[in-house]
Image: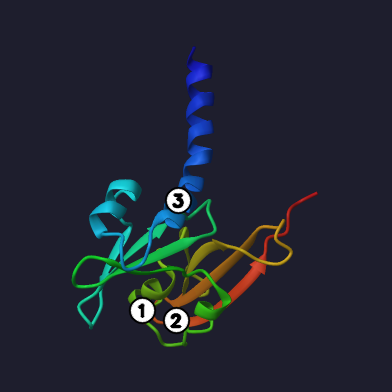
Amino acid sequence: MFKRLVAALVSIAAVLPGCDAIFLDEFKPGITTAAEVQKRMGNPAGEYTNADGSVTWEYNRQPQGVHTHMLTFGPDRVLQRIEQVLTDENYAKLVFGMSKDQVQRILGKPGSSVTFPMKKEEVWDWRVEGTPPAEEWHFYAHFSVETGLLVNTTKMMLQRGG
């Protein structure tokens, strides 16, 4: 009985991230409201207020997923746009000297964070899409432990032991 329950829960958990894609395809800029998005997707992982009065919600599927979607709503709480932010274009926006908050605003929350005391670095890790797509890719943002500012970025394919 217990094994069946665990198996069912694992199966459900594996399918749930796919639901995001279904819901995201149904959301229409200029029509869908914030209340509709929240009802279907739940609470966002992050919420960012923009200078123009709009607000952006983060729906993050780290550490196992490879997408982080940012949904921006106007002051009227109607959807303006949906963006998948873990892209090479957004990685290129990162500039050395940025704060952790600035990096998180562009890419969303990382899947994990590890501090390397000897290097005096904290490294944030996002699982991302890459080429070849069948392999596991990661994007890393390296921050100085002393200043908390971005000092390096890397994108690489994880090598699997064989």
The x and y percentages for residue 61 are 46, 54
- Closer to the chain start, of discs 3 and 2, is 3
User: Looking at the picture, does residue 99 appear above or below residue 66?
Assistant: below
Q: SS of the residue at dot 2? A: strand
The x and y percentages for residue 120 are 47, 75
The disc placed on residue 20 is 3
Q: Which residue is mark 1?
A: 102
Outermost residue toward the front? 31
Q: How many marks?
A: 3
* Nearer mark to the viewer, of 1 and 3: 3
The disc placed on residue 61 is none
Callout 3 amino acid: Asp
Quarter of the figure with residue 66: bottom right
Quarter of the figure with residue 58: bottom left
Q: Which residue is mark 2?
A: 150
Decide: few, some or many residues near mark 3? Use Cα within 10 Å; few <14, some 14-19, many ≥20.
some
Q: Who is closer to the viewer here, 107 or 36? A: 36
Q: SS of the residue at dot 3? A: helix
- Marks 2 and 1 close (CB-CB < 8 Å): yes
- Marks 3 and 2 close (CB-CB < 8 Å): no
Separation (CA) of disc 2 from disc 1? 10 Å
- Closer to the chain start, of discs 2 and 1, is 1
Callout 1 amino acid: Gln
